[in-house]
Image (cartoon, grey):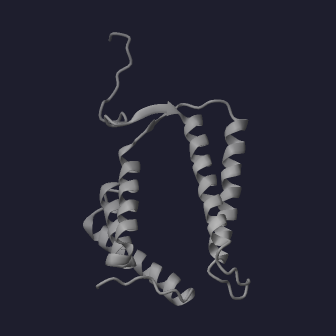
Amino acid sequence: MSGQPETNPSIEPVEGAWARPISSRTGEIVMAAALFGAALFFVWQSLYLPFGGIGLPGPGFFPLTLGIVLAFLALIIFARVYAEPGGAPIHLGHRDVLIVFAGSAGVAFTFEALGAYVSLGALTAVLLLTIAKSALWRVALGTVLGMAAVWLVFKILLGVQLPTGPF
């Protein structure tokens, strides 16, 4: 016994060579600012679309509502961050976050060309395989059920035709 606490390297977090430590307070402020900026963008762009009404919402209704809710939540994050003292360091550039960003960019580029269901299904499958490390049968089941839910919400409940692509 050397008096040093023993650590098990298999349970210590591995951040990767690209991850950089920053203060969690700084990270939360940056994230709240990014959410607030996205909210302002949604509100701004929704003003160019017909609003409609509660009974028959137009194309500007949901972006405006989303923007208002997102701005409110970003302000709550700002208030919580300023009410608490500084936090522990976090690592910017975590592998899982980079996978989600790359997958989201892939959806943006393939949404119309391949169709909504193929691109969103591929994103779901990639995330379940790489981040959740799910078994293949769970990936297939989750992807099929997720795309059925997307079809139900958009096509049946909202009456919106998503791009179908070549398939």
> Does the rendering let one see residue 122?
yes
Seen as rendered, the residue at the extreme top is 2
Q: Up-down: is 127 above or below 85? A: below
Choose between 90 and 43: the one closer to the eye.
43
Q: How many marks?
A: 0
Q: Up-down: is 69 above or below 29? A: below
> Does the rendering let one see residue 144?
no
User: Could you say which quadrant of the image residue 117 lies in?
Assistant: bottom left
Q: Residue at x 32, y 77 (%)?
A: 114
Quadrant where the N terminus is found in the figure:
top left
Instruction: Estimate the x, y position of residue 4 in percent, counting from the top left.
Output: 37, 14
Q: Residue at x 27, y 63 (%)?
A: 135
Instruction: Estimate the x, y position of residue 69 in percent, counting from the top left.
Output: 68, 63
Instruction: Estimate the x, y position of residue 115 in percent, counting from the top left.
Output: 36, 79
Task: Please indicate whether residue 9 sits to the left or right of residue 108 in the image.
Answer: left
Seen as rendered, the residue at the extreme front is 48
Q: Residue at x 29, y 84 (%)?
A: 166
Choose between 35 and 154: the one closer to the eye.
35
User: Could you say which quadrant of the image residue 81 lies in?
Assistant: top right
Task: Please indicate whether residue 71 sits to the left or right of residue 102 in the image.
Answer: right
Q: Up-down: is 73 above or below 10? A: below
Quadrant where the C terminus is found in the figure:
bottom left
Q: Up-down: is 106 above or below 76? A: below
Instruction: Estimate the x, y position of residue 45 in percent, counting from the top left.
Output: 62, 68
